[in-house]
Image (tube, rainbow, N blue to C red):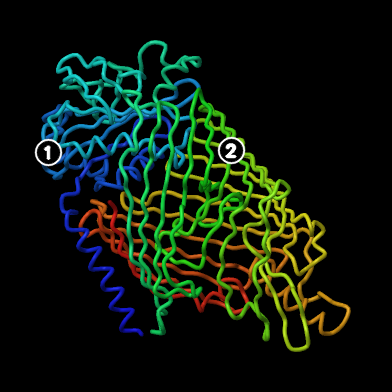
Amino acid sequence: MRARLLLRAAAILIVLGALAAPALARKRVVLLAIEGKGGDDLTAAVEQVLAREVTVLSDGLFRRRQQRLRLIQLTDQAYARISADLLADAVVTGTWRSTGRRWRLTLVVRHGRTGAVVGRVTEVFRGRELEREDKEALAARLLPLLRDLDAPPGAADGGGDGDAPVDGAGGGDDGGDDGGADATAEDGPGGADDGGAASDDVATEDAATGDATPGDDAPGDDAAADDAWADDDGAGGIGPISGRTFAYVRAPVDGGDFQQVSASVLLSARPRFNDAASAAFELAFEDAAVALSGAEGLRVYAREAYVSLRRRGWLVRAGHQIQPWGASDVVNPTDFLTARDYRFFAADPEHTRRGALALLLSPATPRLEVKLVVTPRFPASRVLIPTSALPAGVSLGEPEHIPAAVDNTEVAAKVKVAGGGWDVAVVGFRGWNHTPELELVSATDTELVLRHTHRRIVAAGLDASASVGKLVFRLEASYVVPTDNADGADATRLPPVAAAVLGVERPLGQRLRAQAQLLARAYPQWTDPATVRGPDDATTAARRGLAASNALLLDYQDAQRPAATLRLAYQSEEGRLEAEIFGAMNLVGRDFLVRPLIGWRPVEPVTLQVGVDVYGGPRDRPLGALEDFGGAFGQVTYVF
């Protein structure tokens, strides 16, 4: 059996390695820091988009090579010389500006061989931070430019009809900017193009060009902003089909049987119907030869499948969608809309996130964003239950079925206000706890039958972040009230809970980043699970066992539950090697998780990752109880 599994895992890795053969041609692209208030966050977001298809080289690396080559003015020839030294195929620069009621991102792409501008992308966004759908829209227009880099410079523009040749002396508008918005493209710090000038001086460029044509920042200028959602020619299309495939192997550190051997393929597309309507699809194929849950075999499902309509600052989106709320790391008290499949392991925890059929209505301006979400049937998390969480003699029955109905529909609202370097959001929710809890089905002298169920909750939350110099502070908090246990008197069920996460993040030099968080859970109406009683001794024993199990699984063993997390991350200069270590500890109980992870890109579409999950502490505490599920793992990912 073990030999067969090893052969199957090896076959998966060989197939992925064969798929990676074209990877040697993956392009190398320099991304210079995006200029404007909040530009650091935008640079990180654009880097995530670029990293799907290219190797991203940093601004710092580019500046050091510029210094080494003693280039002061960034002319076309200077860009070409630095690119040649870095073996870079392209350089991307950009600016991030408020247009009154929205935010405009302008990116300029230069050819690495000649330094000339080959295209520009201008996108107008409703909020100060890019949401998932914003990144997808940006990817649909930016990545085709980079794919077409072999074309003659000046022949491409942001995903549609080509620009006229770049003006070699003027630096003015060439009439070919995307989406009908202003065509003046600004530089990143130290030298991107101002719309096509051949020899802009780094020190005087911004003063000479400015951000936009007169009147561009007028709050009422909706026409140009709305047009920026469209393709250049206003036509629709299915767009490129992209995706990733990965093989995952996991086994206990002590050398026991495999915990998971699996292969996954994800296919995604973002068709656009016209200048306002689009769609998104992501289809997942998962084949598990071994799984801790026992769910071996092939699984096919849609991670997301929805249609969107954008017009004049409004977004309407309907379909199966993943809508994660909250900005803290790992623990998100305001993430009421999604669920997780904890029974399927992956190196990226986001792969375990699950969405639901929902309707999203969202008006927004650059300073204010409102989201209203209606979910007719909530997504349920799938959990692994450690043996120490269940009393002896317990068996699990079929989970309770909660049908889709008007009374069972979830409603959530979020109002977010953003300023210079800060944002605050308040959240309201009425629906269900997506994490299941156990309930008693039957109890006899010899057998205890439990099943999974979900409880109705109402909740309110707060989500905020602020940047102070190199420091980024985040605060996320919520108060959740189960409607059938609002007074907390029933210790077999989750009582009302106040949860908060306060975090700080900052870079440590050029290559390291540190993030620390303090977490707290408090139960204002808490009843000790050990005090539960029933009408007789058998029922008392059954109810106390149930209370102890739920308290362990839902983390309400004590009236106050403080915890802390720490993450240290490293990335090599050229982005091929990444390493991080994550740790979490409950300060009451002293149970913990430590997770080191190393990733390496031998060729660019391929990432090799190895890591280990180490759980420790008392086995009757939440993280200590997961010790049976700890293990070493490896994953090979190929992006196409």
Q: At which x and y percent is residue 333?
A: 61, 53
- Extreme residue in the right direction: 535
483 or 19: nearer the eye? 19
Please tell me the numbered disc located at residue 393: none
Q: Is residue 382 above or below residue 179?
A: below
* Label 2 crowd (10 A; few <14 / some 14-19 / many >=20): some
Report the residue marked by disc 2.
Answer: 424
Badge 1 amino acid: Leu
Badge 2 amino acid: Val
**Residue displayed at 44% across by 27% down:** 276
How far apart are the alpha carbons under marks 1 and 2? 44 Å
Q: Of helix, strand and loop, which one carries label 1? A: loop
Q: At which x and y percent is residue 615?
A: 50, 74
Q: Is residue 525 left or right of residue 247?
A: right
Q: Is residue 214 above or below residue 12?
A: above
Report the residue marked by disc 1.
Answer: 69
Q: At which x and y percent is residue 312?
A: 50, 22
**Residue displayed at 81% across by 75% down:** 531
